[in-house]
Amino acid sequence: MDPRWNEDLPIYRQLRDRVVAMILEGVLGDGDALPSVRNVAAEYRLNPLTVLKGYQELVDEGLVEKKRGRGMFVNDGAQKQLLKDERRRFIEKEWPKVVERINRLGLDAADLLAKASKAGEKGDNND
């Protein structure tokens, strides 16, 4: 996890978002343990209650399960659920802004898609 914190958002929320990113990227998979509250608090010099609050949001969202005395673990299907939620959020909230900007700048959507496709092909060849 990145030790830098953004002052515009509460740290517990940023911590939650970082764990979500780790799940989405496959760093944490189904059944994997989250780093302990104590370790995260010590490593990033945070109050353990701040870490716990961030983790509790993940529990409340059904992404993580608390196992008494053992820690917190990623629930089965968490990545799939997050991808579904993130895609929906992108389509509903971000995409309309992107389309508005494309139109405002007078760009051709088909040309942009072709360029994006070519860029994706170049990236695939580098792997």
Image (spheres, rainbow, N blue to C red):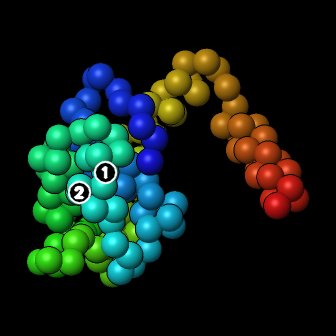
Residue 80, position as x, y percentages in the image = 40, 72
| Residues packed near mark 1 inside 10 Å, few (<14), some (14 to 19) or many (20 plus) | some
Q: Quadrant of residue 126?
A: bottom right
Q: Is residue 111 above or below residue 17?
A: above
Label 1 amino acid?
Answer: Val
Q: Label 1: which residue?
A: 40
Q: Is residue 56 above or below residue 41?
A: below
Q: Quadrant of residue 31?
A: bottom left
Label 2 amino acid?
Answer: Val
> Horizontal placement of 58 versus 101: left or right?
left
| Residues packed near mark 2 inside 10 Å, few (<14), some (14 to 19) or many (20 plus) | many
Q: Is residue 94 above or below residue 75?
A: above
> Horizontal placement of 114 versus 40: left or right?
right
Residue 86, position as x, y percentages in the image = 39, 55
Q: Which mark is residue 37?
A: 2
Residue 69, position as x, y percentages in the image = 14, 77
Q: Is residue 88 visible?
A: no
Taking the spot 42% from the left edge, 63% from the top edge, the residue there is 23
Which is more toward the observer, 126 or 14? 14
Taking the spot 46% from the left edge, 41% from the top edge, the residue there is 2
Q: Quadrant of residue 106?
A: top right
Q: Distance of mark 2 from mark 1, alpha carbons?
A: 5 Å
Taking the spot 66% from the left edge, 37% from the top edge, the residue there is 109
> Horizontal placement of 101 versus 31: left or right?
right
